[in-house]
Amino acid sequence: MKKLYLSDLHIGDGTLKDDFKFDEDLIELIESSSKKNFNEIVIVGDGLELLTSEKVKEKGMVSYEELLESLDVSLIDRIEERHRDVFKVFREFSKTGDLIYIIGNHDSFLLFKEELRERVRQILGGNEKVKIVPYYLDRQFKTLAIHGNQYDIVNRFFINRKTGQLEQPFGDFMARFMMENFDPLLMRAELPEQSVRDYQNIHPTLDVFQWFDFIRRTFDINVDLQEEWSKNFVKLLKTPFAKVWIDKNWPVLKILAGLFINRHGGMKLGDFMVRMVMATRKFRKTDNLYRQARRMLGAEGMKGFRKAMNNDYFAGYGNGAPAIVPGELKGVIMGHNHRHVLRMVSNNGEEKFYANTGTWKPVVELIDDNPDNGFARRVELGYITIEMIDDEFLVQSKHIKKLSAVRLAERTSRNGTFFEV
């Protein structure tokens, strides 16, 4: 038995926010997996980029319920049209092998609309071997594959404390809000197209203000992007949705949010609050997925296991924790934070593993973690393979660095150097 895991492909609709340029690489990987007799491919969330699609952008800031109601299969069809050969090879694989599609946060519309799920199932093969699920508990391999946004406070669904209704993730709302309010300003700043794409791909753990400051120093633009972004964040926090989210998830910030929203202290307080949120995201997204995997694998005892299995984390995703018996799992596979990793986890002398599949989306990050050095775009196409040999696991972490296709252009300004990939 051999299985391939990959995630965060973010295959999009061909517009500016579609950075999936690796059709040939993915086709080669799937065809190679078929030739090597892989039995199963598991897409561990965010296989499709639905959240920032043009179809969603066109709807504006309607309610999440209205948005869901308005979306139809044309959302999926447009993506399939732009990447026909990719979906063709998926369909070929599903004739003989199982294809499991796990829902993440950038494709979470699939959780609530059967019409969309069925269309995705059709473009992937449309037979009984294709399954679309909120997570994948593989009892044969004793592994759990889950996207990981469930453990990210910004990107998980939550229950409104007053109404009891399920609410969309703050990250979803923010992405839509900024598409409506900030992106037009970014487009008018007369930046190179690649720099506009870079904004979409800033590493999840990066303070976005550092990128804005670098852009200001590198390009002669007449818009203060940092100030405009902060102003729009103020507008966002004034929305009823943001107040509900803060009340549920950040009650300690309600006083600060009130000051911020009422503009006492001006933009300096706004900058402080944004940076505090960013810093918390950085801590959680660099450490928290591994920590939660350790808990699920029993490495932090029964108390840790219960924390990871909190039903609140799985709101919308089956609305309950996976039916896992403590100590049952041999491994946990996630995506979401775009960091490709394979780590061993020891539990009472038994070796288990945590794997993250990484991403196929370009990542913009600081050079040597120093804002003065500027930014670079990193492209690593990551995936995990698991093979069962005589009742033992062979887990391999693999990634393709796109060095052969990299073109480095050095543009020097008086303040530093900018590398383009």
Image (cartoon, grey):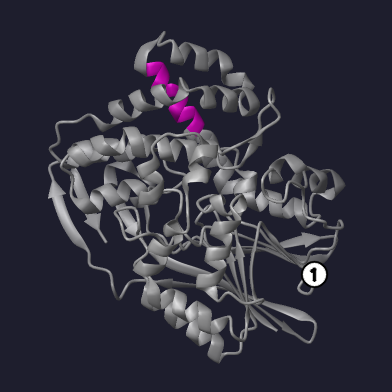
Residue, x 84% and y 43% (percent of image)?
303
Residue 377 image position (x, y, % from top left): 32, 57
Residue 189 image position (x, y, % from top left): 18, 38
Q: Is residue 271 magenta?
A: yes
- Relative to 195, residue 102 above or below: below
- Relative to 169, residue 395 above or below: below
Q: Which residue is mark 1?
A: 139
Q: For residue 6, say whether it is visible.
A: no
Residue, x 68% and y 50% (percent of image)?
317
Decide if residue 358 is on the left or right side of residue 249. left
Q: Secondary structure at mark 1?
A: loop
Magenta residue span: 268-277
Decide if residue 387 is on the left or right side of residue 187. right
The foreground one among 167 and 20 is: 167
Residue 378 image position (x, y, % from top left): 36, 60
Which secondary structure is most common in the magenta stretch? Answer: helix
**For residue 185, which quarter of the picture?**
top left
- Relative to 75, residue 130 above or below: below
